[in-house]
Amino acid sequence: MSEEENIHDLIDQYLRGELERDELDRFRNRMRHEPDFAREVELHRSIVEGVRKVREKELKDYLRENAKVEYIGNIWGSRWLYASAAIIVVMVGMFFFIKKLDTGNQLAQDEQSADEVQKEILKPQNGYVTKNADTDEVNDTTAPEMELPQLVVVEDGEEMTLRSGAVSPEHDMSKLGEEERILEGDQILDSMVKTDELIASINYTVTVISSAIRREKDKSDTLDAYFRDADSKAVTVTTTDESKSKKGRLFRKSDEEDAKPESEVASEPSSTAAKITNRPISVQFWSSPVNFKGYKYNGQTLLLYGVDPSENIEFKEYGNQLYLKRGNQYYIINLANDYKKFTRLTNTAVIKELNR
Amino acid sequence: MWGYKRLSDHKLVEEIQNGNQEVLISLYKGSYTMVRNFILRNNGTEEEIDDVLQDSLIAVWQNVNKPDFQLKVKISTYLMSIVKNLWFKRLKKKSRFTKVDEAAHIRASDTDEFHFNFDKAVIRDMVHELDEMCRKLLSFFYFDGLNNQVIADKMGYANTDTVKSKKYQCFNKLKSKVHERFTKDDFFG
């Protein structure tokens, strides 16, 4: 190694701070006394710094180029926005496409005549039931053990009765056709598609309770009671009439209406006895494939879902509110256009009245 | 270059000391979230994260290559301490009304009394004009701080003596280039 090279290394060491105490002193001394040496050292330092700066920039550029994080947190970055937008567009497109396919099917169905719809739906595995609109002839090729109830689309004023084998003979299944009129238009289609199943149709009597205490105070109530009784008969009559004029709605067979006994317990209004009247209610027990538990009540017929026909249930009415008694619980039954879930009655005062 | 892998601290240090700068990418990715959280919580913005992190990584790069380096804590901890240091220095700078005399924090030079003033920009230009081998060699030595054996392996030299003599040659080459640019007068600018 030459002298110059030695000096070179020495300066390197100095610049790195690696010189020992006495070496350092000597070095500094030399710089103070030899300006050329000092300049040499300074030039050396500048060159080293130049090399470092260039290399540092190079490394920084390298990091800038390659050290990139697709930081998921930066969801507002343009790439993410474009990606999200694209995905949303695709999803919306798919949604509409699928919807279009569905609508296509439905339109096809709607276009079919009622008869045809009936034909299709009423095709159980073993046969089908058709009705000839003109002749009222029913063609039933189902096996007798077929349990699927037949849903009926009844046309203007006509009624139809079909057999269903799933119900015990006591219950008059001839009423089935009429009750099902209550299901209108697209509801029928809906049920058919979803295959809710009618298990039984049973008539019950609603015990209408009127609080006696109130009666005493209000004379008009007594009168109301009188009129109510009268009304119910009158209503019966009107209903029958109306049913004949309305198209396929709320139909009630007139015979059946009159045949039903309306027992009235017209007791003297006293402070303790409650006035009790009865009125009929037609109840259908349904089961839905989604195990819906609830009801639908239109004022005439109550559809019960998730209730077994063999259950011991009662109906009571109090204060113009219908209640279903099931076991020890009362459930509120409201008039509605759609299906409702069972809500328990919690008002203890009312429960007390109902339990009288 | 391998893909992003979580390296052990020990392995990471080894890679740095072998001059494999790809490992910095790995370290960058692994520490990004932590650094981001720190900076955003300390009056920083998204744009500043990259810059600070890059500077910190370079500092780690250089420190790990120092001869007496010993890792006593986790690399992530070490990196974060550098990040924090750098960050608070930045904040201090930001809050100052007058521009700080940059020279003040430069290590006091014993030669200051001689008032030498070499044009740094010229020197940098000359470095760029240097051939690649010399530039790499000088860089590894003076910036990366790789030890001579590692440099020998990287550059394909026979032994560390070759490294030393080659480095000396390259240095002189650069020096004469610089001399050419500077006239005698410039030295006393």
Image: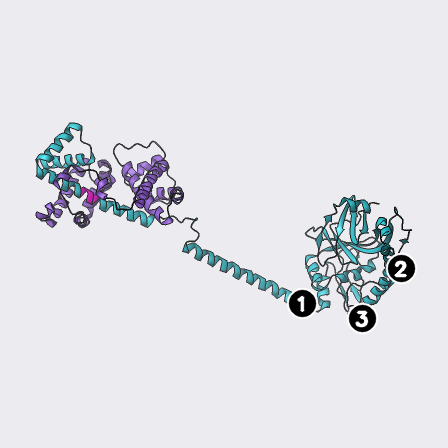
Q: Classify B17 as above or below A280.
A: above
**Disc 2 element:** helix
Is residue B8 visible in the rendered image? The answer is no
Q: CA distance from mark 1 to mark 2?
A: 39 Å
**Disc 1 element:** helix
Left or right? Give the position of A110 relative to B79: right
Left or right? Give the position of A225 relative to A248: right
Callout 2, which amino acid?
A: Ala
Callout 1, which amino acid?
A: Asp
The chain displayed purple equals B
Residue at which label 1 appears: A110
A48 is within the stretch colored magenta = yes
As drawn, the residue found furthest toward the top would be A22
Q: CA distance from mark 3 to mark 1?
A: 24 Å
Which chain does tag 3 point to? A
**Disc 3 element:** loop
Q: Classify A202 as above or below B175.
A: below
Residue at which label 3 appears: A135
Residue at which label 2 appears: A259
Which residues lie in the magenta part?
A47-51
The chain displayed cyan equals A
Left or right? Give the position of A265 relative to A182: right
Question: For the residues carrying marks 3 and 1, which lies nearer the camera in this image?
Answer: 1
Q: CA distance from mark 3 to mark 2?
A: 29 Å
Q: Are marks 1 and 2 on the same chain?
A: yes
